Amino acid sequence: MAENPVERDFEKPILELEKRIEELESFSRKAGVDLTEEITNLRNRANQQKRDVFANLSAWQRVLLSRDPARPDLMDYLSMVFEDFVELHGDRALGDDGAMVTGLCKVGGIKVMLVAQRKGKTTKERMAWNFGSPNPEGYRKAIEKMRLAEKFKLPVVTLVNTPGAYPGIAAEEHGQAFIIAKNLFDMSKLRTPIVSIVIGEGGSGGALGISVADKLAILQNAYLSVISPEGCAAILWRDASKAPLAAELLRLTPPELQQLGIVDDVIPEPLGGAHRNPAEMGTILKASLVKYLDELMQQPIDRLLEKRYEKHRRIGYFIESETQKLVASGVPTLGK
């Protein structure tokens, strides 16, 4: 079970209405009084409040939602989305990193290799798994299992949920940067379909290390960024309190990522966010995965690899074109 839910200012009106609904339902049961009409009206008000609030979320508010402890994570999806999961351990070199989970399973009857980052729900679990920040052993385990999937012609499904790769000294000594770079290279030419879903946080190289995919999708209230907003604020302004401003400038929200061609699809969440209805979120995610896998598995592998290469080569063209416009107009740019 998750620990106490996080209370965010922008959700307070919704929480107050939901609390009032619970009180009326409890009173109705105990007193035997029919309050159906009042409860229905309050539910309608709460739903409208959710639509209004969640239609106008800021980048920082989405970041906060992506980190909610009650948000469904890997362990929830293993029971709701995947069937017959058999975990595969170890990186065949140093150890077994619990922050990265790999295994064979099915989704909608399709056999896949699952590679996913695990945060945990309680403080004890999160500390045990570095709050979802894998060590080099985790990334080495991930690519080893992807190669196994390639050998047996199984598609790969990855679930991304990390603030970033673990930044400890031992991780660097064990080749953190090298193994992530190697994962990018190997995944770019892996001869099997790859689907990657950002289900929460998608931070830096920690996310990129398992998200070079034919289909990269992101949940509606998740984010994907080259750095966390706090880290960006600390570097640019030496003030982590400017994280909300950094979040806006990083363009890390799903609509912006799709507009820039970074992600291929945005998966909708239940009204009010995935943390309010994990079961419905599981149903939506499963349907999306089956659709993506069916689409990719029908394509010849050589054509799939060509499209994967072309897709990732296109990323950055927007920035290049904008820079060229600035240079042509005489505005100084970095390196000029």
Image: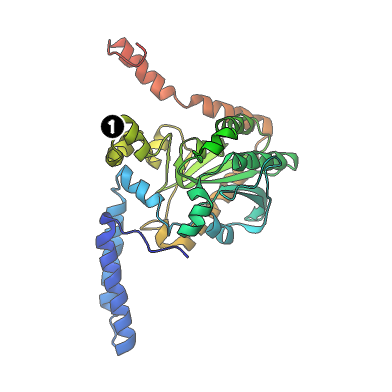
Residue 273: x and y in percent read 39, 56
**Element at label 1:** loop
Q: Is residue 51 above or below residue 237?
A: below
| Residue 91 visible here | yes
For the C terminus, the image quarter is: top left
- Residue 175 in the image: above or below residue 331: below
Identify the residue at image location x=32%, y=10%.
328
Q: Residue 44's quadrant in the figure?
A: bottom left
Q: Position of residue 149 (x, y in %)?
A: 70, 42
Question: Residue 188: where, in percent of width, then height?
Answer: 61, 30
Q: Is residue 322 left or right of residue 205?
A: left
Residue 293 as seen in the image, left or right of residue 231: right
Quick check: 69 above or below 262?
A: below
Q: Which of 266 and 222 is in front in this view?
A: 222
Which residue was labeled with disc 1? 237
Residue pushed farthest bottom?
Answer: 32
Residue 296 shows in the view = no
How many callouts does the rendering have?
Answer: 1
Q: How crowded is mark 1: few (under 14 residues within 10 Å), some or many (20 or more)?
A: few
**Residue 323 appears left or right of 297:** left
Residue placed furthest toward the right? 152
Say which residue appears at 49% left-offset and 54% top-offset: 126
- Residue 2, given in percent of the width and then of the height, sits at 45, 63
Q: Which colour scheme is used?
A: rainbow
Residue kind at label 1, given as amino acid type: Trp
| Residue at figure coordinates x 61%, y 57% from the top left | 82
Looking at the image, residue 108 lies above or below residue 144: below
